[in-house]
Amino acid sequence: MARTGRPKAQLVLSVEERAALEGRVRRRSTPQSWAARCQIILACADGMSNRDVGALVGMTGQSVGRWRARFNEHRIAGLGDLPRSGGPRSVSDEQVAAVVKRTLESARRNATRWSARAMAKAVGLSQSTVSRIWRAFGLQPHRSQTFKLVDGPVFRG
């Protein structure tokens, strides 16, 4: 007796899509999540059921059905991760630019360089936020980039 249930979306791949998916599965640099999604689509295109494909890749049939539907709707671009929810950014682009500009273009009063605490106090952000901005832009103002030759009577040979 034939199985009844919700019909699954038929999946047909073009030659270019199949080559791109197979290439991503074989490539070592492909993230595991992408490789699994590509395997799902390739197996579905070969006519396997969602349950069988799920057993093959270690997912539920429902997850396979979701990836099948997303691929049918958006093709290969639909296999990527969607933006995730989260809190809104608390630091604006203008604040980041101000920290970077101030770090690179000005010196702290009565000091040779900026510390994260001093910069945070000057711009009104937290010390950890300033540290994250500096790390993101590769800034290390606490490291001296130059040296000074001392020319005094004690140092002369």
Image (cartoon, rainbow, N blue to C red):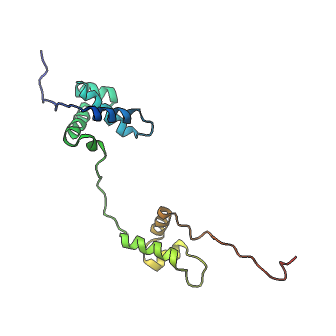
**Residue 110 in view in this figure:** yes
Q: Is residue 99 left or right of residue 113?
A: left
**Residue 59 in view in this figure:** no
Q: Is residue 95 left or right of residue 80?
A: right
Could you say where residue 135 lies in the image, as x and y percent from the top left?
A: 50, 63
Q: In the depicted view, which residue is nearer to us: 3 or 112?
A: 112
Q: In the depicted view, which residue is nearer to us: 108 or 38?
A: 38
Asked if 142 appears above or below 25 in the picture, the reply is below
Residue drawn at the location 41% of the way across and 39% of the way down: 30
Asked if 33 appears above or below 44 in the picture, the reply is below
> Residue most toward the front?
16
Could you say where residue 90 lies in the image, as x and y percent from the top left?
A: 35, 68
Could you say where residue 157 lies in the image, as x and y percent from the top left?
A: 88, 76
> Residue most toward the bottom?
110
| Quadrant in which the N terminus appears | top left
Asked if 12 appears above or below 132 in the picture, the reply is above
